[in-house]
Image: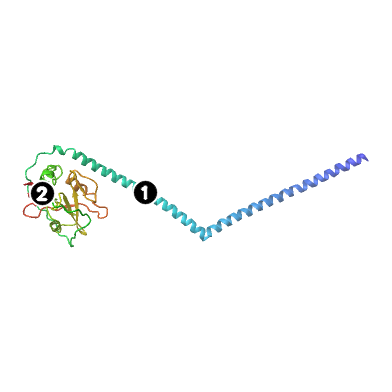
Amino acid sequence: MLADSKAQTRKYDFQQGKELARRRPGGMRASAERALHTNTDRKEAQEAGQKSDKDDPEWQESLRKSKAADERRRSIAKQARDDYNRLSLQGIRKGKVAEVSKNFGSKEQSLPPRPSLPPKPKTLNSGGANGRPHRNPGVQRTISTSTQESIIRWFKEEQFPLQAGYEKSTDRIAPWFHGIVTLRQAEELLSKSVPGSFLIRVSEKIKGYALSLLSLEGCKHFLIDASSNSYSFLGVDQLQHSTLADLVNYHKEEPITSLGKELLLYPCGQQGPEPDYLDLFE
């Protein structure tokens, strides 16, 4: 009986193992199928969510604004770089002009002796300009009580040794230079010229000069400070020049003001039978 009992036990264990072996593959397949269905459902849910976002008008608007903001940031950065480069270039150019003026000023003590009275400059004939010129009230200064005689004496004693009114490095009077000319007379001279024409005159009221310029808007007048053996516009340009010729040459390319864009293009010469600066050199 003991032998029969052991035999039955082995038979039962064999049958149980066989049954487990039969069921296990099916169970594994079921688990795999459930996992596959779960992954498929998750992927489909993600794709549906992404598709839903792309179709959502609010999401589209948010994306558009984000792209626009990125574009604005790139544009602002580019503009900042361009402005920095432009300002750096202007600073370099102004630095070069100041250095040239400084070098020229150091040589003023070695100026040649006073030349003889230069010949009468040729009259500059220009075409007429339409429009009624008017006075620009932008630059003003307190009127001095200096008489014409004291202004002439000031020019002979202080300005002539500096060759004020002469062309650069020559003994010729510049075509744009005029003597003691009033504002009204300057406007009459310029009224026969074209926009961009200019002249520099000795002021009839102060010990200094005035630049008169004909623009498209009419006549403009700028006082020139000559109080420290250098020349600069009052209230407009802080850059100092060693000579009047340096000032003129600089503003042939650089505007006097950023708003008006005034350039000195055409010198307005003498138009009378005699130069109006004769009394300054007698």
Q: Are marks 1 and 2 in contact (CB under 8 Å)?
A: no
**Nearest the camera: 229 or 133?**
229
Q: Is residue 240 left or right of residue 18?
A: left
Give the x, y percent position of residue 212.
17, 54
Dot 2: element:
helix
Residue pictured at 56% horizontal, 58% vertical: 52
Residue at horizontal 9 percent and vertical 48 percent from the top: 280
Decide: few, some or many residues near mark 1? Use Cα within 10 Å; few <14, some 14-19, many ≥20.
Answer: few
Q: Residue flagged by tag 2: what amino acid is it?
A: Ser
Residue 80's tag is: 1
Which secondary structure lies at badge 1?
Answer: helix
Badge 2 density bin: few <14, some 14–19, many ≥20, Cα 10 Å: few
User: Residue 88, percent across and down?
Assistant: 31, 44
139 relative to 7, above or below: below
Residue furthest to the bottom in view is 131
**Residue indicated by mark 2:** 150
Residue 138 location, x and y as percent? 23, 56
Question: Which kind of residue does numbered mark 1 sit on?
Answer: Ala
